[in-house]
Amino acid sequence: MLEKLKYILQDDRRFYFFVVIFLLIGAFVLGRLSVQVTVSNSNDQLSSVVMSHRSESVDIFTIPKSAANENSVYASIHGERYYTLSCRAGDRIKVENRLYFSTVNHALAAGYTPSSQCVFP
């Protein structure tokens, strides 16, 4: 097995190909590990979400869906964009992965950016 690996990696192009592939996989894994999202719910009251991204912690207060109004926006716990309640672009986000914010300012403070597909007042 080791001899086969040595034979395959003798060619410089193959060697660099495998090095690049391993570096890409490593970068992907480290990138996924650098973002940690923890969600805690407390019986239809404000839930606190702590997001850790690039060594910065932001404490975000979200609201339950039942408390959302026309000024509310929502975002995915895995995404970077926020959407208005009337915007169809966010419909593909699963309900269990949505975070609702009472205002746009709360979403901005949480590090989300507005979706280019939504119209904001």
Image (spheres, rainbow, N blue to C red):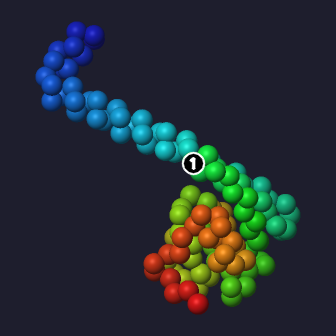
Q: Which residue is drawn at 56% across and 44% down?
A: 34
Quarter of the figure with residue 109 = bottom right
Q: Nearer the viewer, residue 87 or 48?
A: 48
Residue 3 showing in the rendered view: yes
The C terminus lies in quadrant: bottom right
Mark 1, residue position: 54
Q: Which residue lies furthest to the top in this view?
A: 3
Q: Which residue is drawn at 45% across and 78% down?
A: 116
Q: Position of residue 12 (x, y in %)?
A: 15, 25
Q: Where is residue 8 in the image (x, y as percent from the top left)?
A: 18, 20
Q: Which of 66 and 71 is in front in this view?
A: 71
The N terminus lies in quadrant: top left
Image position of 88 with respect to 81: above or below: below
Q: Where is residue 111 in the image (x, y as percent from the top left)?
A: 60, 64
Q: Which residue is drawn at 78% across and 79% down?
A: 67
Q: Position of residue 23 (x, y in %)?
A: 35, 35
Image position of 16 with respect to 49: above or below: above
Image position of 116 with respect to 48: above or below: below
State left or right for residue 53 relative to residue 29: right
Q: Which residue is drawn at 71% across and 54% down?
A: 50
Q: Residue furthest front?
A: 56
State left or right for residue 115 relative to residue 71: left
Residue 35 showing in the rendered view: no
Which amino acid, by three-letter code, is at mark 1?
Answer: Arg
